[in-house]
Image (tube, rainbow, N blue to C red):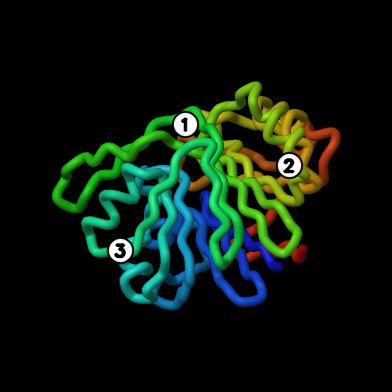
């Protein structure tokens, strides 16, 4: 399995047979190395409804006949737009043909703004656990640190955790480092920083605060082989 980071909160997972995109905010993302028209995902996983996470989901899913998995209210909206969208909720897990997805808590907000300016309620924001080929990936979505991260860490041997460090809208470097203590991943990758002025951060500050995990500061396009 190969896992790669593509700016903001965009993560790509390549298993032996599938390509999975998490939160594919590509168009308008100044930090990404991806071009939306060149991406061919089989599956899109979404943590919540904000436009900088849903991103290019609608066009990508329609072009590639990709399956979308999202929090249920967001999935219902995307289904109304003609997508093959499956809605899940916090604590729920399901074994798909591409791997197992489980939604976890995240403390944030969640709404989607359409091109017409309508604001769609997106349900509860979430993090997600993805398991395939004997490996476990945790994408925290947008969140503050919370105590139940210890439960996530205790019950799952996390190979790679993607955690936001941008502050302002999510936890910053100090709280993210504490989240790593709770999650106990083997490797952690900082995400959701430097895309916009309010979330400007130095990831080296985060790295210096983390004591019990390998910190891999990935540039856009950087990969980890599992």
Q: Earlier in the sequence, mark 2 or mark 1?
A: 2
Q: Which mark is residue 138?
A: none
Helix, strand or loop at label 2? It is: loop
Residue 128 position, x and y percent, is: 56, 45
Residue at which label 3 appears: 83
Q: Nearer the viewer, residue 225 or 5?
A: 225
Q: Earlier in the sequence, mark 1 or mark 3?
A: 3
Camera-near label (2 vs 1) is: 2
Residue at which label 1 appears: 169
Camera-near label (1 vs 3) is: 3
CA–CA distance in space, label 2 to label 3:
31 Å
The image quarter in which residue 83 lies: bottom left
Residue at position x 57%, y 29% in the image:
171
Q: Which mark is residue 156?
A: 2
Residue 12 position, x and y percent, is: 57, 63
Horizontal side, residue 155 vs residue 88: left or right: right
Q: Nearer the viewer, residue 203 or 11?
A: 11
Query: Can you see residue 193?
Result: no
Residue 146 position, x and y percent, is: 61, 24
Residue at position x 49%, y 68% in the image:
34
């Amino acid at each position: 399995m190969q896992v790669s980071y593509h700016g903001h909160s965009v993560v790509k997972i390549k298993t032996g047979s599938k390509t999975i995109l998490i939160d594919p905010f590509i168009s308008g993302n100044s930090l990404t190395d991806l071009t939306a028209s060149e991406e061919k995902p089989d599956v899109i996983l979404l943590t919540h409804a904000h436009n900088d996470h849903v991103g290019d989901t609608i066009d990508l899913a329609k072009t590639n006949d990709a399956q979308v998995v999202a929090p249920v209210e967001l999935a219902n909206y995307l289904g109304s737009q003609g997508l093959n969208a499956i809605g899940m909720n916090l604590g729920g897990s399901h074994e798909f043909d591409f791997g197992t997805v489980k939604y976890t808590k995240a403390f944030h907000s969640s709404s989607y703004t359409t091109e017409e300016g309508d604001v769609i309620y997106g349900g509860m924001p979430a993090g997600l656990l993805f398991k395939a080929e004997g490996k476990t990936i945790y994408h925290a979505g947008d969140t503050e640190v919370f105590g139940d991260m210890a439960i996530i860490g205790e019950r799952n041997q996390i190979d790679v955790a993607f955690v936001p460090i941008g502050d302002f809208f999510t936890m910053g470097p100090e709280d993210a480092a504490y989240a790593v203590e709770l999650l106990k991943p083997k490797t952690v990758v900082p995400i959701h920083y430097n895309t916009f002025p309010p979330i400007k951060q130095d990831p080296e500050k985060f790295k210096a605060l983390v004591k019990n995990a390998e910190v891999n500061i990935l540039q856009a396009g950087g990969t980890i082989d599992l």
